[in-house]
Amino acid sequence: EAQVTQNPRYLITVTGKKLTVTCSQNMNHEYMSWYRQDPGLGLRQIYYSMNVEVTDKGDVPEGYKVSRKEKRNFPLILESPSPNQTSLYFCASSLASTGTDTQYFGPGTRLTVL
Amino acid sequence: GENVEQHPSTLSVQEGDSAVIKCTYSDSASNYFPWYKQELGKGPQLIIDIRSNVGEKKDQRIAVTLNKTAKHFSLHITETQPEDSAVYFCAASGGSGATNKLIFGTGTLLAVQP
């Protein structure tokens, strides 16, 4: 089944403890992206990648890191999480390297930073 | 950079009525305008999209219209059904400051009353 998977689905952590949220797609998509969703703010793009080893900042990149060593994986790294990073996170992928076609979203990761 | 405004934030309609959600964008260079539906507990899913060389697109009960001059686009759902109840997001991409980014509106919670 074609899909985007994220792990973990739920995570509660404490301030400053490094964490990684994994994202994987099995559709051979070029473009991958991370978004955060907050009430009243909609979805905001954190980082995106147009191809292996190519990443770029979205609108809210501060406090996050990403890497794209393989085409299928695009992990989101929080080196020193803070409470304002408590949010619902979505990974997405699309076939076109520009991202201007259907983006397929994962099921989401709900992160709470205490 | 690109800014997308979406209205209304909540919309309640009776089953069988039509629903209209409107979005405006700021970057006249934007050329791709998707609409996503998010059901409770799930990731957003593309329902329809339109590119700047087209003024209207239909898919069964769903239609999107684009007015490039006024920089706004709208989602129209006819003969609404309870399963249309969800959060709907508009987005824009391809602008000069957001060539490969997808900028989302803040979402509309649609409730279809049986």
Image (tube, coloured by chain):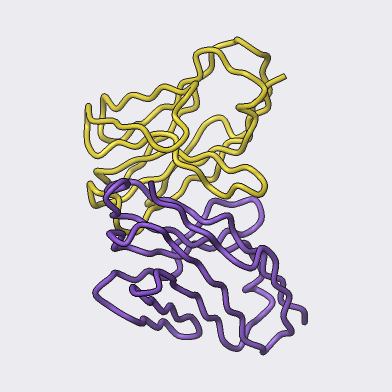
Chain colours: A yellow, B purple
Identify which residue, A49 or A30, lies in the foreground.
A49
Q: Position of residue B40 (x, y in %)?
A: 66, 56
Q: Quadrant of the C terminus of chain A?
A: top right
Q: Position of residue A52 (x, y in %)?
A: 22, 31
The residue at the point 47 percent across, 24 percent down is: A62
The residue at the point 49 percent across, 36 percent down is: A6
Asked where in the image residue B91 lies, by quadrant, the reply is: bottom left
Q: Position of residue B100 (x, y in %)?
A: 29, 46
Farthest residue, direction top: A16
Left/right placement of residue B81 relative to residue A64 reads right
The residue at the point 62 percent across, 61 percent down is: B87
Up-down: is B27 above or below A39? below
Farthest residue, direction right: B114
What is the count of numbered marks?
Answer: 0
Identify which residue, A55 or A92, lies in the foreground.
A55
Left/right placement of residue A110 relative to residue A74 reads right
Identify which residue, A112 or A69, lies in the foreground.
A112
Q: Position of residue A54 (x, y in %)?
A: 23, 30
Up-down: is B5 above or below B52? above
The residue at the point 52 percent across, 55 percent down is: B44
Asked where in the image residue B31 lies, by quadrant, the reply is: bottom left
